[in-house]
Amino acid sequence: VEIIEGLKAVLPCVTMGNPKPSVSWVKGETVVKETARIAVLDSGNLRIHNVQREDAGQYRCV
């Protein structure tokens, strides 16, 4: 996925289970920490506001 710097990105994560599984995101080998710009939504998706160059990388939900 390519996102233009300064825009918003929402990365999807599809999960199923009962109870609803908890979701974490990993960038490379590092757990993504939530900040004012980065949030894990109730759906499990990862939202990044004001995308910056340092946000580039491979993300996966676990």
Image (cartoon, helix red, strand yellow):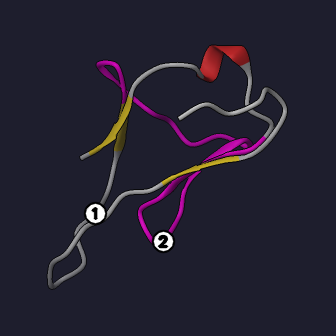
Residue 8 image point, x, y percent: 74, 46
Which residue type carries mark 2? Asp
Q: Residue lying farthest left? A: 18
Could you tell me which secondary element the residue under label 2 belongs to?
loop
The residue that label 2 is drawn on is: 42
Disc tally is 2
Q: Residue lying farthest bottom? A: 18
Q: Residues within 10 Å of mark 2 (few under 14, many from 20)?
A: few
Give the magenta part as a residue range: 27-49
Q: Residues within 10 Å of mark 1 (few under 14, many from 20)?
A: few
- Cβ–Cβ below 8 Å for labels 2 and 1? no
**Is 16 part of what is drawn in magenta?**
no
Image point 29% across, 19% down: which residue? 29
Image point 79% across, 26% down: which residue? 5
The residue that label 1 is drawn on is: 22
Q: Report the side of 15 relative to 50 (left or right).
A: left
Distance Cα–Cα, label 2 vs label 1:
9 Å
Residue 6 image point, x, y percent: 84, 32
Q: Earlier in the sequence, mark 2 or mark 1?
A: 1
Q: Residue lying farthest front? A: 2
Which residue type carries mark 1? Ser
